[in-house]
């Protein structure tokens, strides 16, 4: 899909590139823009299992994930980091730590 249209008429466009990484090989979106001027660049680094998305104002947010595809860390546009811990077998969220260091643990 390179474009879709919302019911109100606005169009959303996508650019794609082929990526090969340690977990898979696939086409991935590398850019996105709209008729109204929103623009995003998606920077994939499959070797480190990360994706950073930068908008047209230069704000960047990043996600990191593990070999199972579960998000292990998220850094927002303000540079605030949240981390996540998962169980190995059940793939259940065990806990998270937010930017100020507050921890939430599953008991």
Image (spheres, grey):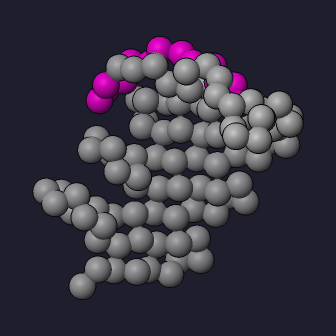
Question: Residue 27, percent across and down?
Answer: 46, 19
Question: Residue 39, percent across and down?
Answer: 77, 34
For the N terminus, the image quarter is top right
Q: Is 87 left, or right, of 35 in this rendering?
A: left
Residue 60 appears in which quarter of the rendering? top right
For the C terminus, the image quarter is bottom left
The residue nearer to you, when weighing 90 against 100, is 90
Question: Residue 44: within the magenta?
Answer: no
Question: Residue 80, percent across and down?
Answer: 64, 63
Q: Looking at the image, which residue is at 53% across and 77% down?
A: 101
- Seen as rendered, the residue at the extreme top is 18
Number of callouts: 0
Residue 9 appears in which quarter of the rendering? top right
The residue nearer to you, when weighing 26 against 62, is 26
Q: Looking at the image, which residue is at 86% across and 34% down?
A: 37
Q: Is residue 87 above or below residue 39?
A: below
Q: Is 52 left, or right, of 66 in this rendering?
A: right
Q: Is residue 91 visible?
A: yes
Main secondary structure along the magenta-highlighted residues: strand
Question: Residue 89, percent across and down?
Answer: 13, 57
Q: Which residues are magenta?
A: 12-24
Q: Is residue 32 visible?
A: no
The residue nearer to you, when weighing 17 against 12, is 12
Q: Looking at the image, which residue is at 29% across and 71% down?
A: 94
- Seen as rendered, the residue at the extreme front is 7
- Seen as rendered, the residue at the extreme left is 89
Q: Looking at the image, which residue is at 70% across and 40% down?
A: 7
């Amino acid at each position: 899909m390179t474009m879709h249209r919302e019911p109100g008429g606005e169009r959303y466009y996508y650019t794609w590139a082929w990526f090969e990484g340690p977990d898979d090989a696939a086409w991935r979106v590398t850019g996105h823009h709209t008729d109204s001027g929103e623009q995003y660049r998606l920077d994939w680094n499959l070797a480190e299992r990360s994706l950073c998305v930068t908008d047209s104002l230069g704000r960047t947010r990043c996600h990191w994930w593990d070999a199972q595809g579960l998000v292990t860390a998220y850094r927002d546009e303000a540079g605030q980091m949240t981390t996540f811990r998962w169980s190995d077998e059940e793939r259940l969220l065990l806990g998270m730590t937010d930017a100020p260091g507050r921890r939430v643990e599953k008991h």
